[in-house]
Amino acid sequence: MLDHAQVLHVARLARLELSDDEVGRMAAELSHVLDHIEKIRELDLDGVPPTSHVIDVVNVLRADVPAPSLAREVILAAAPERLNDGFGVPSPGAA
Amino acid sequence: MSELIDLTAAQAADRIGAGEISPAELFETYRQRAAANELNAFTWVADAAPDGDGYAHNTPLGRVPIAVKDLFCTEGVPSQAGSRILEGYRPPYTATVVKQLAEAGAPLLGKTNQDEFAMGSSNENSGFGPVLNPWDRTRVPGGSSGGSAAAVAAGLAPWAIGTDTGGSIRQPAALCGIVGLKPTYGACSRYGMIAFASSLDQAGPLTRDVTDAALILRHMIGRDPRDCTSLEYPGEIELPKADDLNGIRLGVPEDLTGAEGGVEPGVRDSFDATLKLAEGLGASIEACRLPHAPHALSAYYLIAPAEASANLARFDAVRYGLRVGGDEDLATMYSRTRQVGFGSEVKRRIMLGTYALSSGYYEAYYGTAQKVRTKIAEDFHAAFEQFDFIVTPTSPWTAFELGAKTADPLAMYLNDFLTVPMSLAGTPAISIPSGLSDGLPVGFQLAGPAFSESRLLDAAYALERAIGFDGSEARA
């Protein structure tokens, strides 16, 4: 079960602002889903290795050869705010 | 005109090759149908056929145009992954598989609607409105590649590509009465696909028939230096030609098809009838065990959201996309942009994934899910020692009514019960239409071991011919 404080903590970790209404709904919905998911914790998984990639691939390497990237102008064209030759962002603030 | 849209893509390519129809005429026919967009299947449609000079006259894909799921980056063309946070975003580069298909002679017809960031099983999570099912416009087309599936079923596109993370090609293909194939993980490059869950996402075809699926898959596979999880595909994708299933051993996993799967009676009838047809073609059918597969859904709904929460961290209002709260401090800008830009299902999964990865819960949730994934992959390995293919219905249900499951996220997730196990095991699987239940299409799923695509297509082809499904009603 997730309470409101936990929801707000996770939302802060995820950089996600939630309205009061969303916090309430999220607590109920996530708790409901987690109740179902909890069942896998009953399985005996002692000594089972975790899988992150199902087809065995080890050490994918390539030669370190410089190649041109996309032009700066092309990349900056999509930016919400451009500042000289970079991305403009607001101040991180006092916090 | 109507004659043109009744051709499969392979047939259209043959006619173009024989000089009987012009590629420009074919493109324009589909372009107009796509642009009318009554099903909301498209988020962007080309203005005109591409300049002929850019495409060699004798190309393997015959200059038959293709619809591409919105989340594939296409240079200069809106690529929004169904999300308002990327509204109007036009990437400066093109996804590898889209580029490969264009080079093989399949020009871009349009971008198709989808659940936001591929999270959903009904297309109702799109930031650009739901897609309607061409068989019944009060019903969903499935998801997340619902726009691609509806477009092909309705004859708005000759063929399409989508992506499948937990069923997002196979399930909409089933609900729209077309063919959908999820390849072996790593068979196709993920470069330029806006990522949902990187260890599961795979591109694949959605087509009118099995031959069309084989034809495009041929040109999608291959190792890409820009995706280090992509693999050198052993051999080629063969065009299917089998007319029987002699010696083929099919396993029916009762762990999935039993009571827990919640398969509707009409879907079960169609599945059983298809098994009879398979037997008639020479296949043997036996029950098989996948003891951990019923836990796949739980593992999936930890692994996929966990990966998504990391992948979606890139939407920070700095380099592209929406910005809200730019007059506040940086952290407020991040969190407010994401509040406004993401839809509720995406927020739910980001929260679930962040929680599963957070300090104190990581081992209990994400770590456990990855171990379950190992057990599921082992189950499949063991089953494929005894069986050539594992078969199930693709979806427990036929297309449901718009709004029927939006109030209960868990009920929506259960739709993926039969497709998620193959995703976690990384094995290829195909859905073909097996018939109608109350006038709505039913999908039959075949799954094989890694890199068995050619054999899988062959078996699906033999079954397709025996089933004789007629999808023309959806194009009317």
Image: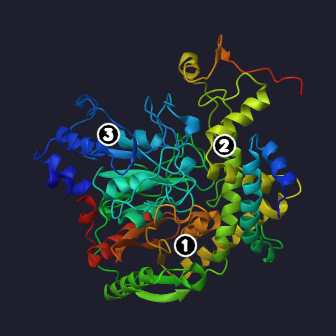
> B306 or B459, which is in the foreground?
B306
Residues at marks 1 and 3 on the same chain: yes
Q: Earlier in the sequence, mark 1 or mark 2?
A: 2
Q: Position of residue B440 (x, y in %)?
A: 36, 71
User: Does B343 appear above or below B462?
Assistant: above
Choose the circle earlier in sequence order: 3 or 2: 3
Q: Who's the residue at 27% across and 54% down the image?
A: B155
What's the chain of the residue with tag 1?
A: B
Which quarter of the figure is the C terminus of chain B placed in?
bottom left
Mark 1 or mark 3, earlier in chain: 3
Which residue is identified by label 1?
B418
Q: Residue at x 28, y 47 (%)?
A: B61
B36 over B140 or under it: above or below:
above
Q: Secondary structure under badge 1?
A: loop
| B74 relative position to B296: left or right | left
Residue B312: assigned label: 2
Q: Which residue is mark 3?
A: B107
Q: Quadrant of residue B273?
A: bottom left
| Residue B453 image label | none
Question: Which chain contains the residue that carries disc 3?
Answer: B
Along the line of sight, which residue is nearer the eye, B137 or B432? B137
The local crowd at label 1, few if under 14, some if 14 to 19, many if 20 or more residues have their Cα within 10 Å, is many
- Amino acid, disc 3: Pro
> Mark 1–mark 2 contact, CB under 8 Å?
no
Does residue B198 show up?
no
- C-alpha span from label 1 to label 3: 33 Å
Please name the amino acid that badge 1 sits on: Leu
Which amino acid does the dot numbered 2 rest on?
Leu
